[in-house]
Structures are given as structure tokens and as C-alpha cells.
Amino acid sequence: MSVSYTGVSWTPSKKRYDLVIGLGVALMLAAFALTGALVDPLATAETLVLRALSWTAVALLHVILAIGPLARLDPRLLPLLYNRRHLGVSMFVLGLAHAAFATAQFHALGDRNPLVSALAGYAAPGVNPRWTDLPFEPLGFLALVILFLMAATSHDFWLKLLGASIWKSLHSLVYVAYGLVLAHVALGIAQSGPAALLTRALLVGAACLTALHLVAYLRERRFDRGGRPPAAHGFVPVARLSKLADGQGRPIVVGGQRLALFRVGDAVHCVHGVCRHQGGPLGEGAVIDGCITCPWHGWQYRPEDGCSPPPFQEVVHTYPVRVEEDIVYVSPTPNPLATPAAAGDHHARETDATSQEGA
Amino acid sequence: MSATPDEFPRHPNAVVDRGAFYIGWQPRMPAALARVIRPLVITLVVLLVGLSAGVASTLRSGPPGVFEFGVVRDLDGVFYATPLPTLRLRDPVGGGAVSYYVVGAGKRGIPDELRALAGQRVRFRGTLIHQGGATMVELTEPASLTPSGPPPPGLERPAPQTVGERELVGELVDTKCFFGVMRPGLGKVHRGCAIRCLSGGVPPGLLLRHRSVDGERELGTVVMLVGEDGAPLELDPRWAALTIRARGTLESHGGIPVLRTRALELEPSS
Ligand code: HEM
Ligand code: FES
């Protein structure tokens, strides 16, 4: 969260995660290469390595893209999301190795620079009579450029430097990269007869990813549309105090915005529901060490003023809360940023929005 | 307490009993969560490893050519430059003489130093490539090329036999890769490489596909393409891996089909 570059902080969970990535990747590469060598004894080592690398990369890409919606559909899977960037970097390294092998094998030792040959070798008018004849290597190259930019900016240092929205847009390009990889395969090996299982696996993969994203999206949308209209005093009723568990967040929708409600002891606090890190749902978080903690990567905010505890500098808006007759109401208008906000206290029938409760 | 419903809508995730709230920077994953994550991750890894083996088992690398990569032999014979660079040498196994096509190392045809020795006896170190009845030799070590004087008797080339005028349709391949250097050595995936090889001077070939007599397998025969006058054929290397129609005089060079090509065009579709 800090502005300076701090390197990756290793936790036992990250170490275990990386161990599983390393082991899984090694097993996949070995299974692919050994099976390939057994069923096709004439296959050269270069081809087996080239294909094992690309297959493993594209399989990991599917896992990476599935984790997001899966963790939305079942938050018990969030530990898979926590360190997803290491999966991304591993996938990039595999893709890069594949691209390097492919460029060397198919384009080196000729009469032209191998990279130029791979990217422009057969792009000329008239030499590709059908669209399926169009070159497939440049599509893989474009995908690799995107994956490189993502891997290179995956550290939070870059997130701070670029700002959350640019960073997030950049990382949404993973879907473009995925499309480019599918096109790379469709214009390449899918056109050679014996690649049927690979092609089918990728089609099934694309269908599953689309379905997962769609289901997760529709579920969120239904909730987002379920907000209540405001009461006479302009505040919106959002929950029953008696049903709020101490220290556990509650996502709510107020005036079309996703907010997060927290009961801490006798006080009720409301903050904006979108984490400053990567947009995690704060309402699905919990209070740890007195701080609202995002369920995705654990960034923290004080319930009273929405500020991250020092030395961190993130801040989310807080919202005025009042409690009447066991009903919690939240104002759609946020408090000024980084000001200690009023918390709804159920001893008070009405809390003045400017009082310094819990500061 | 929070699980019992009231009149307010709950986000579905707020209702899930997660076992515990856990963030990766905390030292230990709660047991209830580990009971979900561990079997899931193990299943996923097993599934992916199995799928890797499955996908690998269906991919094939190409027709059964052989490149004796790493085996460099001493060759001694008479070099002929046209219509295809050929080394005529004593048959290493039986009596008599055999012909090997000659190509350069990498994605190259023969170097000028060799071309200049047409009709002479030469020695060099090279690597064999063979498929079916055709053998090719790569001049792996250009520095080993030694002119060795006039051709000894018995290494003349047999005269080619004319088969007749033919119009052939097939895939344009570079013969070095097709005979066994690359896997795959034909088709779309290999196109970029074939373009480099053709552009670098490797002799082009036309791959004619046909069914085996029992109809079970697809077979391929490669017809070597040369210019009508016997010089190397001029063509756009970017036509590699595409379907080509070629017209000319078909000859048999010791059993290997060679087309003296009069006309060559790209098939618009198929
Ligand atoms: C400069 C960039 C790239 C080049 C030149 C390149 C080249 C190639 C070539 C020549 C093949 C066919 C290999 C064969 O079947 O023998 C291939 C296949 C494939 N590539 Fe790429 N590629 C690049 C980038 C990528 C990236 C970034 C990915 C995914 C992360 C990728 C995924 C695949 C897959 C899944 C296949 C099909 C399986 C295979 O045949 O290996 N490629 N690529
Ligand atoms: S999104 Fe990463 S911690 Fe909130």
C-alpha cells in the first residue's frame, strides 16, 4: 500500500501458493512432454517443449480468468484470488518461453531477422487468399505484449503510480490477450487435423469462462438493483441492527451505490463499498484489529474516518448513519473525505451527522 | 444471527458461512477454509495434469521423415548443380551409386562455393535427412568443403525419364523441412518457417495428397519443382503452405518425381 517500492512481502500463504504453482506447472509440462514423446516418438524435443509451454500457459490463463467469478460466486475461494498475480506472472513466463522457442525454431537461421520474419513474414496483399491463411504468429505476439505489460506492472508500486483506474483498465486487457491467444490457435494449429482435442478443450474453456462471468455479473446486478428508496428524512433504510453481527461487514445499496455497513460494538459505520486497491467488495470484509479489512487482499480502513492506518494513505468515503427503532439508515451523501464521521449509535435515537462519535 | 432473513435484501455472499474470515497475510488458514481449498486445488491440479497428457496424446508432429541431427558424416562424391543440387556418391550399403540432394545449413540452399564446383568431385561433412525414397544431405560444416578434382568414373547421373505433361495441384512445401528436419514440416503452423527456407534457397516441392489403397490413411508424395530450363524455380516464397497449381513436364530422376515447371499459380480457394 505504501508509495515506495517494497518488494514482495512473503507470507506463508504466498509461499504455499507459489509452491503449488511451481509443482503444478512442472507436472503439467512433464505430463505433456512425456505423453507427447510416447505417442509420437519422432517428435523433436523442441516441438514437445514448445507445445508443452504454450499449452500450460493457456491452461493457466483459463484458471486465472476463472478465479475472479468463482470467488464472487463462493467467497470461500478467495484464498485463490489473494495471490493471483503470481499465477499471472508464471503464465507470462511460460508464454514468453513458448514465443522464444517458436521464433527460434521457425524463423532463425534464415535470410531475415527472426523477429521480423515472425511478425511480417507473410503479410502481403495477395498471398493470403482466404482469411484462414492470415498469419497467426503476430496475434500471439500482441497477446504477449499485453501479458508483459501486465506482468511488469503487477506490483502495487505500479498501481499507485498509474492510479487505480488506469491500472485496472490495463489489467482488463487480459481479456483482449485471451481473445488474441484463441485467435492465435484458431489461425494456427487448429487448422491442422490432429489438434482436435486442443481445439475442443479451448472451446469448452471459453464457454465455461463466459458462463461463469455471466452468472456472477447477473447476481451482482440483481443485488445492485435491490436498493430501497429513502425515508422522509432522506436517509435510506438498509438493515436491522439486531441482525448485524459485530465486526462482520454487510454490503448494502444506497442511492445506486454499493456501500459497506459495519457494526463495531454499539456503533454502526458505513463506508464506500469499493476497495481503493483493486475494487474489492469491502462489505464482504470484516473488522480485524479495529480496521475494516478488504476480503480480497486485506487492505485496511478505519471505520470512523475511512482512512488506512498509518503509514498507509488510502482513504474511502464514510457515510452518515442513524439508527431508529432497530432500523439502520444511511445517507446517500458521503461525508467529506477523511473526516471522522458520525456513527449510528443505537442508544441515540437520532445521531447528529456532525458529531465526532468514535473519532 | 445475521443468517436469519429479514425484510432487507442480502448480498448472496453475505449469507455464505465461510468458516472464518481469512486474508492471505494472516499466518494460518482456518481449518474450515482449508477443508474447502485443499481438495479443490488437488482436484484442479490432477485435472490439469490429466488434460495435459490428453491434449499431448492427440497432437502429431508430421510425416515420418528423419533428420540425423547431431550425426555428421564424411561425404565424397560428384556434385551436380542443376536441375537440383545433387551429390552422386557410392552407395554406402550396396554397390552402385546413389544421389543425395544437397542443401545448406539452417534455412538456406547451397552456398556459392559449392555451386561453383558443379561437375567436380567434392568432399564435405554433412547430416542426412531422409523420407521414403528421397535422401538429402545438409552441408553442416561449410568449412569442410574440399574440391577433389575431376569426377571419378561410375558417378555419372542416370538420364532422367520423361513421364509427360502434367497439371498438378498440391501444397507448396520446402523440401528440407518436409523430408524430416522440422516437425511439423508442412501445413499452416509451419508456414513461416517454409517461407524462410524457400526464400533462403531450399528447393520447393509440391505435396500431393492421396488416400492409401485401403482408404485408411492419407499419404503424401512430394514432386520436386524446378524451372522449365532446369534452373531453380522462381516463385513467391510466401505461397508456402498454400494450395498451388503447377503445369509442366514431369520427369523421374531415379524414381523421384521432378516437375520442370512452366506455369505456377495460387489456387484462390479450397
Ligand atoms: C511472439 C509470440 C508468439 C509466437 C511467434 C508463437 C508461435 C507459435 C507457433 C509457431 C505455434 C505452433 C507450434 C506447433 O504446433 O508446433 C504456436 C502455437 C500455440 N501458441 Fe504461440 N506464439 C506466440 C505467443 C503465444 C502466447 C503469448 C501464447 C499464450 C499464452 C501462445 C499460445 C499458443 C498455443 C496454445 C498454441 C497451440 C499449441 C502448440 O502448438 O504449441 N502463443 N505458437
Ligand atoms: S481489492 Fe485488494 S485489498 Fe481490496
Image: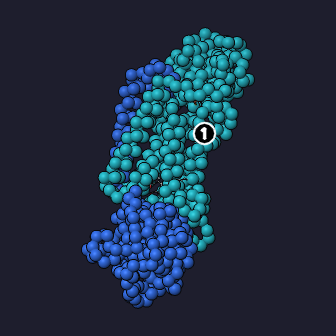
Please give left or right for residue A230 compared with residue A204 in the image. right
Q: Nearer the viewer, residue B204 or B104?
A: B104
Image quadrant holding the N terminus of chain A, namely: top right
> What amino acid is labelled 1 in the image?
Ala
In this view of the protein, which residue sits in the foreground, A87 or B21? A87
Q: Residue at x 65, y 12 (%)?
A: A358
Image coordinates of residue B172 in percent, x first then y, are: 47, 73
Image height of A314 relative to B91, above or below: above
Residue A306 visible in this rendered orientation of the protein: no
Chain identifier for the blue-coloured part of the image: B
Say which residue appears at 37% left-offset and 48% top-offset: A32
**Among the chains, which one is cyan?**
A
> What chain letter is assigned to the residue under label 1?
A
Q: Position of residue B192 (x, y in %)?
A: 52, 63
Q: Which residue is at 27% across, 73% downward? A: B94
**Residue sitting farthest toward the front:** B149
Q: Which residue is mark 1?
A: A152
- Where is residue A187? Give x, y as percent: 50, 61
Horizontal side, residue B54 vs residue B171: left or right:
left
